[in-house]
């Protein structure tokens, strides 16, 4: 099946980025205010990567919020920015902030024009069904002026897919072959959908994701392309890293792979955050959940939970040398993690 659509790599130029704003008090409880503060830190790192007094400005941000309180809080935050015109706030029926999964995947069509693809969304295998989350892809595509094509016979999320922009994709069996999403589908069946929707020419399959990850193994916590032919993943940190075996298996699986162009993948590792706990259980904390903006890379750290900067500092030093951006920002995401994800999970880039 030939595809007239292709998802660009995240490092390709963006016209804007779409971000979810924490809106639901009943979901976030005491973490609502701190989570909003961390989203604001992400926005500042995208909009003003060289600092607020520098002349350089990043890609515009579209922020989706729901309810009067959330809109008011977002407007207050916007008013504190040195250039508020770069941030547009939309009142939208967003269930929660995870736009990487609920929103559309922006692609280029056969003419090079912006379009979007969307899959069926069932609350990460039926775990967290929130009103309107299955509708937000259409809302965002309409606001962005992107022609949307739906693939409702397939259930999946943007966080389950990583691409080099040249037809190579990475995903996990734990997620897309899970009976809670696509019962009865084979790898070939899934690959055919990804080819039609996103232009996948080759799909690299990993097995399991991080412990404590309610998304069932989203790849944006595991392995990310940083250039064509080069992928970064994590190595265990500390003797009690709950993902030691999983991370070793991922590195081994990637090391034997070639991409859609036939290049053998170069695999680079950065240290994981180690054991990060929420309420006594391992949390799916990952430095891989970084966002590549036009002028900066924003990598999550979890120092409020771990109390130390060691792994995050080393991870940042390695990662900043792998991605061609003038600015690198390590930003704490401990409170967003209480909701189940981090910066990549709440964002969706809109290609130029």
Image (spheres, rainbow, N blue to C red):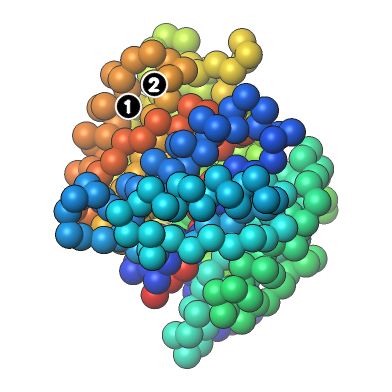
Q: Tag 2's secondary structure? A: helix
Q: Does 83 sit left or right of 50 as displayed?
A: right
Q: Is residue 317 above or below residue 320?
A: above
Could you say which disc has been placed on residue 303 in the image?
Answer: 2
Q: Residue beneath label 1, please?
A: 312
Out of 95 and 218, give the one closest to the viewer: 95
- Quarter of the picture holding the N terminus: bottom right
Q: Are marks 1 and 2 in contact (CB under 8 Å)?
A: yes
Q: Nearer the viewer, mark 1 or mark 2?
A: 2
Q: Position of residue 73 (x, y in %)?
A: 55, 45
Query: Can residue 89 be seen in this snapshot?
Result: yes
Q: Tag 1's secondary structure? A: helix
Q: Residues within 10 Å of mark 1 (few under 14, many from 20)?
A: many
Q: Residue at x 42, y 9 (%)?
A: 239
Q: Does 272 sit left or right of 206 as displayed?
A: left
Query: Can residue 269 be seen in this snapshot?
Result: no
- Mark 1 or 2, nearer chain start: 2
- Quarter of the picture holding the C terminus: bottom left
Q: Does 286 sit left or right of 271 as displayed?
A: right
Q: Residue at x 53, y 69 (%)?
A: 106
Q: Position of residue 33 (x, y in %)?
A: 55, 32
CA gap between label 1 and label 2 equals 8 Å
Which residue, as the protein is rendered here, is positioned at the far bottom?
111
Q: Residue at x 70, y 51 (%)?
A: 67
Q: Is residue 58 above or below residue 310?
A: below
Q: Residues within 10 Å of mark 2 (few under 14, many from 20)?
A: some
Could you say which disc has been placed on residue 189 in the image?
Answer: none
The count of marks equals 2
């Amino acid at each position: 099946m030939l595809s007239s659509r292709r998802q660009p790599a995240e490092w390709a130029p963006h016209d804007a980025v779409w971000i979810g704003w924490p809106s639901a008090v009943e979901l976030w409880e005491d973490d609502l205010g701190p989570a909003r503060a961390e989203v604001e830190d992400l926005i500042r790192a995208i909009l003003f990567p060289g600092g607020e007094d520098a002349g350089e400005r990043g890609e515009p941000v579209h922020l989706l919020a729901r309810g009067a309180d959330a809109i008011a809080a977002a407007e207050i935050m916007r008013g504190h920015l040195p250039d508020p015109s770069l941030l547009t706030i939309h009142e939208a029926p967003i269930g929660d902030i995870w736009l990487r999964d609920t929103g559309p995947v922006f692609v280029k069509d056969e003419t090079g024009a912006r379009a979007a693809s969307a899959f069926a969304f069932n609350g990460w295998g039926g775990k967290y069904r929130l009103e309107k989350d299955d509708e937000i892809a259409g809302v965002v595509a309409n606001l962005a002026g992107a022609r949307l094509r739906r693939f409702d016979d397939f259930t999946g999320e943007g966080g389950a897919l990583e691409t080099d922009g040249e037809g190579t994709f990475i995903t996990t069996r734990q997620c897309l072959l899970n009976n809670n999403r696509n019962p009865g589908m084979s790898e070939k069946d899934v690959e055919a959908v990804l080819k039609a929707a996103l232009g996948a020419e080759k799909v690299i399959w990993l097995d399991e994701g991080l412990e404590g990850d309610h998304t069932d193994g989203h790849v944006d916590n595991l392995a990310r392309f940083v250039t064509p032919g080069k992928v970064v993943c994590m190595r265990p940190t500390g003797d009690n890293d709950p993902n030691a075996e999983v991370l070793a298996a991922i590195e081994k699986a990637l090391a034997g792979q070639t991409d859609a162009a036939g290049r053998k993948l170069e695999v680079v590792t950065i240290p994981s955050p180690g054991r990060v706990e929420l309420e006594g259980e391992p949390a799916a904390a990952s430095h891989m959940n970084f966002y590549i903006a036009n002028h900066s890379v924003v990598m999550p750290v979890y120092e409020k939970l771990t109390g130390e900067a060691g792994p995050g500092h080393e991870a940042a030093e390695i990662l900043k040398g792998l991605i061609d951006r003038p600015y690198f920002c390590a930003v704490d995401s401990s409170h967003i993690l209480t909701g189940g994800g981090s910066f990549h999970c709440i964002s969706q880039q809109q290609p130029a």
